[in-house]
Image (cartoon, helix red, strand yellow):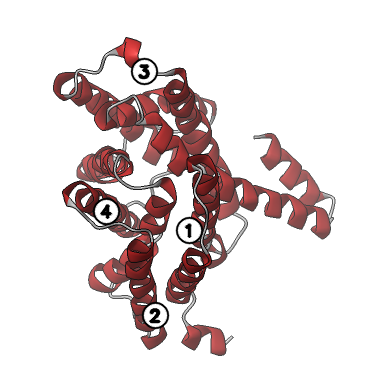
Amino acid sequence: MSASIALDAAQKTHKPWLTGLITSALFLIVCLSWGTTWLGIKIAVESVPPLTAAGLRFLIAFPLFLTFAKLRREPLLFPRESRWFFVFVTLSYFSLPYYLLNYGEMHVSSGLTALLFSCMPVFILIFSAVFLREKIYASQVLGIAIGFGSLFMIIRSQGLHLDHAELLGVLAILAAAIMHALCYVVTKKQGRAISVITYNTLPIGIAGLMLAGAGLAVEAPAVDTISLRSWGALLYLGLVASVGGFIVYFMLLKRLSPIILSFVFIIFPVFAVIIGAWYEGQTISAELMAYSAVLLTGFAITKLPLEKWLKG
């Protein structure tokens, strides 16, 4: 909240350089918080089963979201005619995808998880064409082909043989990306009148209860076996990545072009790969760097098609 006050103060005092500096800092904060999410998940599932870990993360975040909703006097319930949409968001944005991400990271490195999830804007593009009848440009199709070709080469270069466990991990992460993309597109069509705090608060609380309850029933986690590292990761995911990243992202959404802001999804995988390699004691090969650069360039083209760029 203090960052928002500073940004508003800079705008009121007509200091564009200060406004730009603060905006750039907030953009970097989002990239860092989301870039470190993947390592946080990796550490959390070291001693917490995936269902339980996803549920605990949301239960930690829920009280803060509830506090923001009360302070801003935002409604907790979706409009009556959008109750089906509430169920859809709870299941397809929070519950199932985050369980799939946690499961996937048990078998795939945090950096590769972030690169796999960076495909999500491509699925948004595809779903937008199908459901919203938005035009897909030839350069975007080329960008998709470049991106997925590079992703295949990254998987090969990382030595993944895609045995049963690794294949399921990769498929789980891609499924989470697809579900998030579908939810973003449906939200664009159905959720315009719903504030972002209403959109997140109750769904995240209910998803937390559902996931934690399912974890207790299916995984039967032993609390005394959860390490302090995993507890710390869950606190980080719930308080910093979920709440902090969310608040700063939507602050920027009011001040930046959606196209510019969407490049967060291109930049945060870079942080994730670097941080994950450092934590896991791996060397980032020149081959991985090259393929990653090509992959992110391909996906960047899908977000800013050359036809539009040439037209200014």
Amino acid type, mark 1: Phe
Residue displayed at 26% across by 23% down:
212
Question: Which numbered circle lies on residue 226?
Answer: 3
Mark 2, residue position: 140
Q: What secondary structure is marked by label 2?
A: helix
Between circles 4 and 2, the one closer to the viewer is 4
Residue 147 relative to residue 32: left or right: left
Q: What secondary structure is marked by label 1?
A: helix
Q: The N terminus lies in which quarter of the figure?
A: top right
Residue 307 in the image: state x and y as whole percent: 48, 88
Q: What secondary structure is marked by label 4?
A: helix
Q: Local crowd at mark 2 within 10 Å, few (<14), some, or many (≥20)?
A: many
Amino acid type, mark 2: Gln
Mark found first going from the N terminus, 4 or 2: 2
Mark found first going from the N terminus, 3 or 2: 2
Verify CB contact (< 8 Å) between mark 3 and mark 2: no
Q: Local crowd at mark 4 within 10 Å, few (<14), some, or many (≥20)?
A: many
Does residue 35 appear in the picture of this structure? no
